[in-house]
Image (cartoon, grey):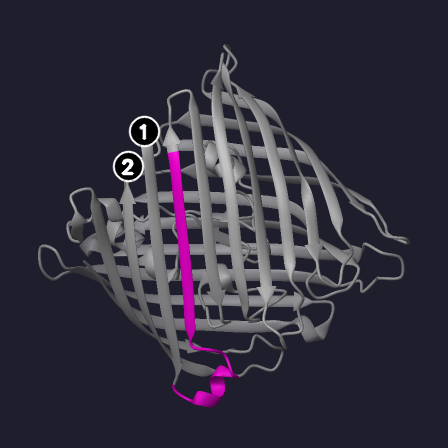
Amino acid sequence: MSTSLISRVLIATLGLSPFFPVLAQETGAEIDAAAVNEEVTSYLDDDADSLLEGDAPTGLEDSPGGFALFPALKIDLIGSASYIFDSNTTQTPVADSASVFAFGFSAVTKAGKESDPGGYYSLNYNGQAFYYTDSADDFGRDPYEQYFSGAVGVNGGKTRLRLDVNYHRNNGNSIQWDNIQRETRRAASHDYGFAFSGARDLFRGELLFGAGYTLRDFDPGTGFGDGENVYGDLAWMTSPSFAPKSSVGLGLRFGSDEYDGNPSQDFTTPSFRWNYKVSRKTSIHNSFGYEFRSIDTPGSVDSENFVYNGGISWAATSKTGFDLSYYRNVLPSYVLTGEDSTNTGVALQMRNNLPGLFELSSRVGYENAEYFAGTAGAASNRDDDFVRLSFELTHPLMITERLRGQWALFVNYNQNDSSQAINEFEQTITGLRFALVY
């Protein structure tokens, strides 16, 4: 098993350093149509909070271990243990540090490939337990985190269909890059996501369609209300004869946001979408749209916004790769009654295979969030700048033919500067992780 493969397997378990991030938002991210699954499963990860959402392949189907319950059913198991020092476990302006031990367990099964004719499915369970060396430092948070996701689909050649579901019991313990939350921070919640997507090949193009629903159900006492999103997405893409490496098309995204404390909002976003495979090592995808957001409440303020998302992937060499992601979107606020925020962000990730089987993954991300009134009289003038850095050095452990592992050193730095001092925090997370894959 290669260093990269082991890294991806362990990332699937811990989520500490996803390899192929795309910029997201508090309730999810619209991911452009490089493939139908990416095109229409936006808003699935409603715990991603306004920065990076990991969507890396696990690589588990290639692992040498695992065990077979039936000839066609193989299950891979991963376990891990980490020591972590968190400089600001409450993510508040007045930092409170803590030492934490984290233990993870994951079971994954997968059958079939989405690119092959016929059916396929995948199931993933990820559990984590966090133990603070000083019990007072957990601030009443339940130590256990649970995550389940599943997908089932069929590839009929010209027609492809897929259904995705996920559930996350978020107890506010997560310290990984994807779950550091600028607005809701470490509020506990039950998070649900469902998405149906499909594609139909047409002459010189394809029709993409999908629909989905997400719910973030906060625990009583957190001070946050529930947040729901329902959406539909349609797009037609074609490859012009004069640009066979490109696909261009028009799309329409529509739906509604229902956040407790805020009036219901409906949105419609026509967009222009463009994908370009420059070479085997470089690809580009973009979606540019104009969103019409309406609030059906007396005294409400409708808004129109230019929105976009996209990214560039570049395999510079066989040992070095880069991923650049960028976005602009509008969302209701979980915190401020009657307000939305315009979120603009960018992130860059670099991966390096080093001598001696070491691998270094580094990331930098920035987001600006400008709040504005959605109803008359609501005007906080809040403006946030969210900066994040991450470095992780990994090395594989070759224990037996079937039992492999990895050790890793990691550092994450997060800083939120806000026009309202109560919303500011600075946080450094350092740790050492050992993990086993069977």
Q: Residues within 10 Å of mark 2 (few under 14, many from 20)?
A: some
Structural distance between the alpha carbons of marks 1 and 2: 8 Å
In the image, 253 versus 413, the foreground residue is: 253
Residue kind at label 2, given as amino acid type? Gly
User: Circle 2 sits on which residue?
Assistant: 112
Q: Are marks 1 and 2 in contact (CB under 8 Å)?
A: yes
Residue 69 at x, y = what percent? 18, 51
Establish if 83 lies above or below 317: below
Q: Is residue 136 magenta?
A: yes
Considering the numbered disc 1 on the image, is that residue within a helix, a strand or a loop? strand
Residue 419 at x, y = what percent? 74, 67
In the image, 350 versus 169, the foreground residue is: 169
Q: Residue furthest left?
A: 401
Q: Is residue 384 left or right of residue 67?
A: right
Establish if 166 lies above or below 89: above
Instruction: Please tell me which residue is depicted at 38% across the width and 86% down the height of the picture.
Output: 133
Figure quadrant of residue 303:
top right
Residue 154 at x, y = what percent? 38, 32
Region in magenta:
133-153
Q: Quadrant of the C terminus?
A: bottom left
Q: Is residue 57 left or right of residue 334?
A: left
**Residue 261 in sight:** yes
Establish if 401 lies above or below 248: below
Establish if 262 lies above or below 156: below
- Mark nearer the N terminus (1 vs 2): 2
Instruction: Please tell me which residue is depicted at 75% across the width and 49% down the height of the picture.
Output: 265
Q: Is residue 294 left or right of residue 416?
A: right
Residue kind at label 1, given as amino acid type? Gly
Instruction: Please tell me which residue is depicted at 28% across the width and 67% down the height of the picture.
Output: 80
User: Circle 1 sits on which residue?
Assistant: 118
Considering the numbered disc 2 on the image, is that residue within a helix, a strand or a loop? loop
